[in-house]
Amino acid sequence: MTHLTPVREAARVVAIEAARAYVANIRPIDLTNPGVLVGHLMAAETLLMEIVAAHDESTGAAA
């Protein structure tokens, strides 16, 4: 198990908090508007990719 650097831990917190803030600010979604639905799906996918990247253990450095 590796120890996290303060910068790496901060990146994780920022990514998770960004996703929480996005979800907290979602208003009722017009389910009949495909453009709005696609927009929300794309934003969610981007946020999830940022969370995965922040938690990715493969830094390329040898342990």
Image (cartoon, rainbow, N blue to C red):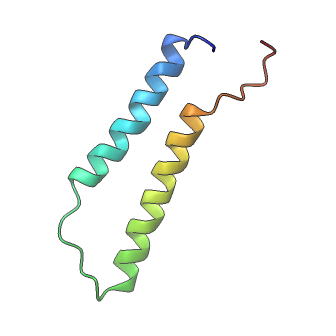
In the displayed structure, 2 sits above or below 40; it is above
Residue at screen point 28% across, 83% down:
31
Residue 27 image position (x, y, % from top left) = 18, 65
The residue most toward the left is 28
Judging depth in this view, the residue of 19 and 36 nearest the camera is 19
Judging depth in this view, the residue of 2 and 54 nearest the camera is 2
Residue at screen point 58% across, 10% down:
3
Q: Quadrant of the N terminus?
A: top right
Indicate the quadrant where residue 59 lies.
Answer: top right
In the displayed structure, 31 sits above or below 14; it is below
Residue 56 image position (x, y, % from top left) = 62, 33
Q: Quadrant of the C terminus?
A: top right
Residue 33 image position (x, y, % from top left) = 32, 86
Query: Is 56 positioned to the left or the right of 10 in the image?
Result: right
In the displayed structure, 12 sits above or below 49; it is above
Residue 49 image position (x, y, % from top left) = 55, 48
